[in-house]
Image (cartoon, helix red, strand yellow):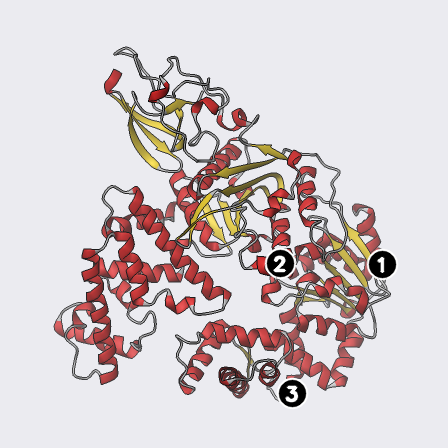
Amino acid sequence: MNLHDLNDRQREAVLQTEGPLLIVAGAGSGKTRAMTYRIAHLLQQGVSPYNILALTFTNKAAKEMLKRVEELTQGKAPDIWIGTFHAICVRILRRDIEKIGYQRSFTIYDDDDQQRVLKDLFKRFEIDEKQLSLREMKRIISDAKNKLMNADDWFAQTRRDRHSQTLHDIFSAYDIRLKSANALDFDDLLNKALQLLVDHPPVLQHYRQRFQYVHVDEYQDTNLAQYELVKLLTKESRNLCVVGDDDQSIYGWRGADIRNILEFNKDFPEAKVIKLEQNYRSTQTILDAANAVIKNNESRMDKSLWTDGKKGDKIRFAAAGDEREEAAWICEHVRRLRKNKVPLSEIAVLYRMHAQSRVLEEMFMRAGIPYRVYGGTRFYDRKEIKDALAYLRCLVNPDDEVALKRIINVPKRAIGDATVTVLEEQAQALNTTVYGALRDLPDSLGSRPRKCVESFVELMDGLNNKRQELPLGDFVKHLLDETGLIKQYEESTDEEMLSKRDNLLEFLGAVYEYEKLTENPTLEAYLENVALVTDLDMQEDAPQFVTLMTLHSAKGLEYRAVFIAGMEDGLLPSARAKLEENRLEEERRLCYVGITRAKEHLYLTRTRHRAIFNQASYNQPSPFLAEIPKELISDEYGNTMREHFGEYKPPKERVRPSQRQPKTSFGIPGMGQDPGEIPGVQKGFMPSVAAGMGEGAQIFEEGDQVLHRKFGAGRVISTSGKGAEARVSIMFTAYGEKEFSVAIAPIVKVE
């Protein structure tokens, strides 16, 4: 191992082996390298692997750290404990958990197991899931445990009203049920480990003597339980090395407390603080933008990223007219990156909310650009969207038993598996479908399930009648309301449930958009359209993908080119975050994380008008945009127009002003602009080039790149006719294939 492989600050951190140490590691500054070299250096100095503990937040990070240490020490680190907080706590509990009343063979309950327990308790306490969802109850319990509270502690901080008492009783019963099953949930793994160490000093002393050198990665993401565990283990040795970046603390909503890193010196006044500010990832232009944004946060440590690498290209920015133009602009620039030898695997599109992916996915599909959604499910594959589509499918084709079984008890209407089994047996006896059996129920079916099935049939009959009366969009809205698909989510305060509601509203917006753009919109045609858009089998086989993900999912990743979509006030920062200063600062950190994912190319987009959650809005730019110095941004409306859209060849004939179509408000360069305002197009000229031309004139050819005033960039796929009868078919990135009369169409050829 050669310490000369490190920069001065990294080397200083490695050599600081005794006492508390805070390594403030900026984005892309080589924090993992510093930590692994430090552990390897301790081993070289004679510290036993048995005495070293390293805590991470992901199994991937733990495996990577262990691999690097073994490479640096030629495999001399088998006894080091390197793992996630939860994995290390399990090892501690397996050894001594009987001291707090459990058996060492305890089971760890996952999310589904927890919900099954809560579901049974809801029945016992006669709780209506429409009033309190299982996930909401689970969130309450998890949030309390992350703050080291049991049911009684939690209740003491409430209003102590009847509702709080009910929640307390469920919470208490939940813990009792887990205890009787000799089971722990994930939050218990931390809490019970703490309980064991606090209640049994000999156990605590054993681990204090063993772990003389403790390391914590991503310290800014620790919650109260993790913070207390680390303090407890290192109280005597004081040999605690934590690595983190307060500017990348973006998980406050799930319990992370930024104060743990900001107030490290209060807990350890003798601590040494070393800042890693040299960046090995991004160009200086990107770093200057990131520094300019994050410096506006008050709750942070002063630092500024820099690189000895190249300055790099300016940041490209576009203010699109709407979300479809925004997506088209992104697709166009992805193509250009690909042409310039940037692999698709090195390109990412980031956004604040999952609902934003819907239009992006559709546009990438139409543009033939392979993509994958990371850290989330594709829009039309999400459960709540599949539920809505299943209702529509069942109305179009009642014989679709897959769709029927999916929705017959969604939302919950007391038609359980046993009832469905009876219906399947009846269908077989009558030689009909399950849907047919709904109208001829067997005598063996009890009165309550019979009533529920009859109510479902009445619901579906009513929907079928409304389907004949209402336009497509209005009908889907009626269906979402009538079935309760939206209502089941909108009454929750849980962020995940509200996100599902938002996705259903976004789905409704997609239906209305389809209705608006389609000449004869029918339910059957819409379902076919969705099936085609979501058929990603070919893309899954492609060797390269553009990655689509939320900004939260992007933390820890890096790409040569990064697009951040939706830089709008109300999206980034979110509308909810604007109500609290600390949440606004976390949103700014989220923006900072997005910017610092980019190595070479950064693209920022916003729209003037966006339809999301079925709500149309006219949006102001994100305040974070104004924090980026103007000189760092390439103006897509100015001097760089030719760079991205080519130089436009002016038409040969002047068209009278009365023939010009009015300007539109589209914001993408060349999309909706008066052609006379586009650099390279002479003022006063109309982009139609067919007027007055001879019978045999050849205007467009297959493969020509063109620009339409409204529909933007496209490619000619076929031509027909001559002179005044000439027509051209164009495939547009944003709007698919359209056909025009060459004589009057507002089209220019891109040379």
State the separation of the CA atoms marked 3 and 2: 35 Å
User: In the visual, does 359 lie left or right of 454?
Assistant: right
Q: Is residue 536 left or right of residue 206?
A: left
**Residue wearing tag 2:** 250
Establish if 649 lies above or below 713: above
Residue where numbered disc 1 is placed: 16
Which residue is at the far left? 430
Q: Are marks 2 and 1 in contact (CB under 8 Å)?
A: no
Which secondary structure lies at badge 3?
helix
Mark 3, residue position:
100
Residue 220 sits above or below residue 599 on the image: below
Give the foreground label among 3 and 2: 2
Earlier in the chain: of badge 3 and badge 2, it is 3
Q: Residue at x 42, y 18 (%)?
A: 684
Check disc 2: other Cα within 10 Å, few if <14, some if 14-19, many if 20+.
Answer: many
Q: Residue most toward the front? A: 658
The CA span between labels 3 and 1 is 38 Å
The location of residue 267, given as percent across then percent down, is 80, 69
Residue type of the residue flagged with mark 1: Gln
